[in-house]
């Protein structure tokens, strides 16, 4: 490995600079996207920092502290004037708002709600129904760093209360199986995962290269050990440099 100035710059970019917010904003800017949907608000670290003409956020429980929301609003007020907040589950949102979604198709979607295989897949398939032909879906937490982080619990609270070894308060669950499933079953989607910020999955309509051969049953039975053995291939892991090239293909 060469440690010339060029490489040092790249390493720093890998580790320090890129995260989900950078990726989402770069996609929105490149596409001049109008409608942005995020599922899962958390503390608003992503949603409130994104700039887009129309932003929609869905969460069954907006837990953000009043002081914090005020701070964000003052700091980023121009980014958050026309936000639409829906306090409900993603399932309820996609059912209750389908008429609206059909008339205003989504340009960029960020999925970061309940971190289970079943729910993340449901959120992804629902988003696809209302996605513009050239839209982009971003799926967070596709590349868990440990078995504990990837524990297939039913909720964050359940995982947090299990006394799992090496618990860091970060839980990605088994969202990675949604990538394995799509990479095995969908010829019509282009899918890759950026190898930083817990794995940022990118899904667009297109042709899938290097399809996987898992059946639905295989995927149910895959364990974290299987992911560890075959991470690059299962997730189609890519670097920030690849993302820069991908960005140029968007219009
Ligand atoms: C990890 S946080 C989101 C973080 C945020 N997207 C960010 O990047 O800063 C996950 C959020 O998903 C929400 N959530 C849990 N179940 C959900 C569901 N069924 N539908 C939508 N949101 C859900 C939780 O309330 C929590 O606020």
Image (tube, rainbow, N blue to C red):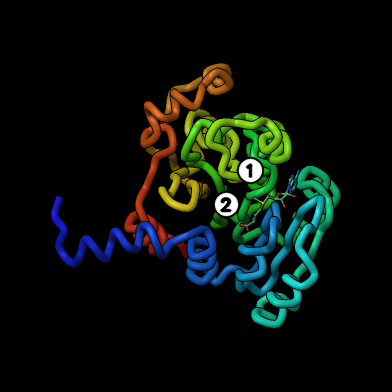
Q: Earlier in the sequence, mark 1 or mark 2?
A: 1
Depth check, front residue: 79 or 229: 229
- Tag 2 residue: 137
Q: Residue at x 86, y 49 (%)?
A: 96
Question: Mark 1, residues whose alpha carbon is within 10 Å: few (<14), some, or many (≥20)?
Answer: some
Depth check, front residue: 183 or 172: 172
Q: Is residue 157 left or right of residue 227?
A: right
Q: Is mark 1 within 8 Å of ligand 1?
A: no
Q: Is residue 96 left or right of residue 8?
A: right
* Callout 1 touching callout 2 (CB < 8 Å): yes
Q: Is mark 2 within 8 Å of ligand 1?
A: no
Where is residue 153 drawn, in percent x and y? 67, 31
Where is residue 208 drawn, in percent x and y? 43, 39
Q: Residue at x 42, y 32 (%)?
A: 234
Helix, strand or loop under label 2: strand
Helix, strand or loop under label 1: helix
Where is residue 22 drawn, in percent x and y? 49, 65
The image shows residue 89, relative to residue 76, as above or below, that is above
- Tag 1 residue: 124
Depth check, front residue: 129 or 63: 63
Where is residue 210 drawn, in percent x and y? 37, 34
Q: Residue at x 67, y 35 (%)?
A: 159
When asked about the image quadrant of residue 121, the answer is top right
Inspect this view and state whether residue 98 appears: no
The image shows residue 155, relative to residue 53, as above or below, that is above
When asked about the image quadrant of residue 160, the answer is top right
Question: Mark 2, residues whose alpha carbon is within 10 Å: few (<14), some, or many (≥20)?
Answer: many
When asked about the image quadrant of residue 62, the answer is bottom right
Q: What is the C-alpha distance between the residues marked 1 and 2? A: 8 Å
């Amino acid at each position: 490995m060469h440690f010339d100035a060029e490489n040092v710059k790249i390493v720093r970019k890998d580790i320090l600079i890129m995260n989900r917010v950078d990726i989402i904003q770069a996609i929105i800017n490149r596409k001049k996207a109008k409608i942005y949907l995020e599922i899962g608000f958390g503390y608003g670290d992503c949603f409130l920092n994104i700039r887009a003409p129309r932003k929609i956020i869905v969460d069954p429980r907006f837990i953000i502290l009043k002081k914090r929301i005020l701070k964000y609003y003052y700091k980023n007020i121009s980014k958050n004037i026309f936000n639409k907040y829906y306090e409900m589950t993603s399932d309820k949102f996609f059912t209750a708002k389908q008429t609206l979604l059909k008339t205003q198709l989504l340009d960029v979607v960020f999925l970061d709600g309940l971190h289970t295989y079943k729910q993340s897949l449901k959120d992804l398939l629902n988003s696809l129904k209302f996605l513009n032909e050239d839209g982009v879906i971003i799926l967070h937490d596709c590349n868990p760093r440990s078995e504990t982080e990837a524990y297939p619990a039913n909720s964050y609270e359940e995982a947090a209360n299990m006394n799992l070894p090496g618990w860091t308060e970060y839980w990605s669950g088994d969202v990675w199986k949604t990538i394995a499933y799509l990479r095995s079953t969908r010829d019509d989607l282009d899918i890759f995962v950026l190898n930083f910020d817990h794995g940022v999955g990118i899904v667009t309509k297109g042709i899938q290269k290097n399809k996987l051969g898992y059946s639905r049953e295989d995927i149910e039975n895959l364990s974290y050990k299987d992911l560890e053995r075959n991470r690059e291939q299962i997730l189609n892991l890519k670097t920030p440099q690849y993302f820069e090239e991908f960005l140029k293909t968007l219009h």
